[in-house]
Image (tube, grey):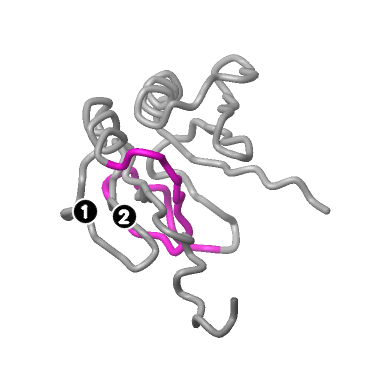
Amino acid sequence: MAELRICVDVPDLDRAITFYTRALGLTLGRRNGPHWAELLGAGCPVDLLPVEAGSVASPAAAAVRDFARHWTPVHLDLAVDDLDAAVVRAEQAGARLERPIVERRWGRMANMGDPFGHGFCLLQFQGRGYDELLSSSTG
C-alpha cells in the first residue's frame, strides 16, 4: 500500500509553518531548508512546498498557481474534539470562517479558508459520526 502524504503549495514557507502549527496544532517534523517542511499530527504527514504565485502548476494544464481564495475539489478535513475552540484557534492564526458552523446528522462542520487561498473544513463528529448517514438497518 502506498503512503498517503498531503502536499500544500504555499508562497511563504515560514508563514505557512506558523499558520498550520498554530491554527491546526500540527508540529514541525523534518525540514529541508527553504524548500520543504513536513508537519505531523494529522494522521498523515502534511508537506508544505514553497512555490511562486503565477508559476505553472503542471505541464499538462494551463492553470497557474494563485494564492487568492480559490476552490479545488480536493481539500483538507480535520476532525477535532471541540469545534468552537478549534475555529477560534484557527481564526487567531489567520484563517477565515467562511460561513456559520453547519449542523449535520453526523456532527458539526466549519468551512474555513487559510491565508494562502486554500479551503479546509473542521469537523466535530457526534453520535456515530459518518455512520449516522447509513440506514438504521445497516447496523
Residue type at the position of mark 1 = Ile
Residue type at the position of mark 2 = Met
The kind of secondary structure element at disc 2 is strand
36 lies above or below 129:
above
Majority secondary structure in the magenta region: loop
Circles 1, 2 touching at the beta carbon (< 8 Å)? yes
Q: Nearer the viewer, residue 20 or 109?
A: 109
Residue at 61% across, 39% down: 43
Q: Is residue 99 magenta?
A: no
Q: Position of residue 104 (x, y in %)?
A: 31, 65
Q: Nearer the viewer, residue 98 or 41?
A: 41
Residue at the spot of label 2:
109
83 lies above or below 136:
above
Residue at the spot of label 1:
101
Q: Nearer the viewer, residue 129 or 50?
A: 129
Quarter of the picture holding the C terminus: bottom right
Range of residues picked out in magenta = 61-83
Q: Is residue 34 left or right of residue 19?
A: right
How many neighbours does mark 1 have within 10 angstroms: few (below 14), some (14-19), or many (20 or more)? some
Residue at 48% across, 35% down: 51
The kind of secondary structure element at disc 1 is loop
Q: Position of residue 22 (x, y in %)?
A: 37, 23
Q: Position of residue 95 (x, y in %)?
A: 26, 36
